[in-house]
Image: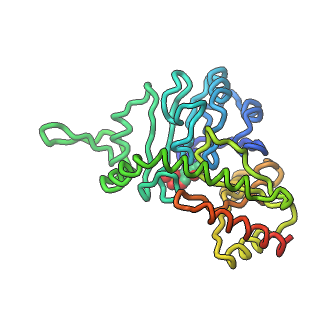
Amino acid sequence: NVILEVGATPVLVDVDPVTRNIDLDKLEAAITPQTKAVIPVDLAGLPVDRDRLYAIAGKRGLRVIEDAAQSFGASWKGRYIGTSFGDQRDFVSFSFHANKNLTTSEGGALVLPADIDTGLCERLRLQGVQRFPDGGMDVDVLGGKFNLTDIAATIGLGQMKNLQAFTARRRKLARHYFDCIDPALGLELPVADFSNSNWHMFQVLLPEGVDRGKFVAEMKQRDIGVGVHYPALHLFSLYRALGFKEGDFPHAEDIGRRTLTLPLFPAMLDSDIDRVCTALRASLSETA
Ligand SMILES: Cc1ncc(COP(=O)(O)O)c(C=O)c1O
């Protein structure tokens, strides 16, 4: 949506069926002389390969806008996403929305590259206002109301103290899912990455032919809430109206049809994961 918002043309690229992140081979193939920037998403907190990403961007002269909404606390080769990678870091955007690993209920943070005027970003953030020491103010640019409130910031600073513990607990719970999901159920599991990913979500792909709606209802009957993140976005009406259609991005479509997000949050107990796994088996046997 942000691409349309600024009047640019979105060029979508299919995802890799294993990582479920942008396919970097297909990204390279989609770049044209008109391409200005690439917006990779770290889906479920699994980072896109930053080495390859920045190698492609560097070679083709592209800006990178890292949609790191889901990867706060995740790492790439031992360094947190959003920290400086030398020339391997451009513009990074985090979300602190209510469902994120660290939340301020609503809000987020930008990590800006050296050539972006931080003062301009601050003015754009809150109605273009620039304040002077004598109490005066000026407005020289059309700003919005995108500020994080002081209350939200205070919540976020409090939460920051728990971030490492949250991430460690999520990794442990994710491991437990790998241990307890029976391979015979035929679920496709996410990449088993316990060093980079922050395990924002644990997502499985349902076996071909399982009715996801029925499956979700079966899980609900067993008091387990599950989610769908996300249907392929090019099939939303807004994007169909731009000319996108079925078959354009087969991997995104397949994942979008079969993906299911299982419960995963730091306060879960190991026994909760066991309960989800038991419900998975029972629900699959009802719907397969
Ligand atoms: C991948 C991704 N990008 C962007 C956003 C938007 O973040 P926000 O809700 O803080 O605007 C979200 C989540 O909400 C997201 O998951």
Question: Residue 9: x and y, percent?
Answer: 63, 42
Q: In this view of the protein, can residue 162 be seen by the observer?
A: yes
Q: Residue at x 57, y 36 (%)?
A: 75
Q: Name the colouring of the figure.
A: rainbow
In the rendered image of this protein, does residue 92 appear above or below residue 284?
above
Q: Position of residue 138 (x, y in %)?
A: 23, 41
Residue 224 shown left or right of residue 16 in the figure: left
Residue situated in front as seen by the camera: 240 or 55: 55
Which residue is at 58% across, 62% downward?
269
Tell me where residue 69 appears, x and y as whole percent.
54, 47
For residue 228, side relative to residue 76 (left or right): right
* Residue 33 in the figure: left or right of residue 251: left
Q: Give x and y (percent) for residue 193.
A: 67, 42
* Quarter the C terminus occupies: bottom right
Who's the residue at 58% across and 51% down the image? 170
Asked whether 18 or 142 is in front, the reply is 18
| Labels in figure, total | 0
